[in-house]
Amino acid sequence: MWLLYTIGYQENLDFSFLSVKPRTLAGFPAIITAPLVHANLWHLVSNSVPLLFLGTCLFFFYESVGNQIFWRCYLIPYALVWLLGPRVAYHMGASGVIYGLAFFLIAFGLLKRDIASVLLSLVVLCLYGGMLFTGLLPGWPGVSWETHLAGGLTGLLSAIQLHINENKN
């Protein structure tokens, strides 16, 4: 994210073509690149801090499923936006990943019900709860609520599926 932003800034390049544009052929490969593209420095910083914190929590507390959950949250929200997004606009940034990780950590911790997982859920909810729920609704110009919603659903459903699978064994 930072490398791409730095290159774009130094060379005065616009990388918005690497963003998801729903139901367009050019927008399909961007499912992979959209989380790396940010509109400006504020956008990049505001995505970097939560991504670093939530990613660290994911891999520290749930190391055995960390890769699986991270890649689900990285790819599925952007695929859903490409497939179902109601607005033909550029959808960029790591917020889909952030929403996916946050919803996973909150939901899985509450479902798991051990003290460390529940505490982690509460910490994530306290730090990001207000942003998480207001960001799911349309109304902020230039903000992809569709990506937030797709990320949140991805994280929530991943937590439920993982919980069910753990209880089968």
Image (cartoon, helix red, strand yellow):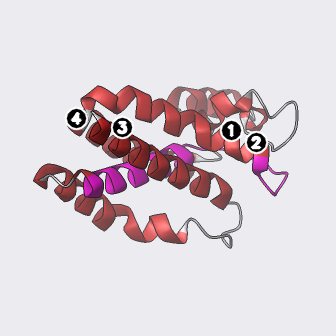
Where does the C terminus fall, quadrant-wise? Answer: top left
Look at the picture and state if 79 lies above or below 85: above
Type of amino acid at the residue the image marks with label 1: Ala
Type of amino acid at the residue the image marks with label 4: Phe
Residue, disc 4? 60
What residue is drawn where x is 41% and y is 43%?
51
Q: Which residues are magenta?
A: 84-111
Residue, disc 3? 165
Ranked by sequence position, the earlier of labels 4 and 3 is 4
Type of amino acid at the residue the image marks with label 3: Asn
The local secondary structure at tag 2 comes to: helix
Residue 108 falls within the magenta-colored stretch:
yes
What residue is drawn where x is 11% and y is 54%?
115
The local secondary structure at tag 4 comes to: helix
Residue 149, numbered circle:
none
Residue 163 falls within the magenta-colored stretch:
no
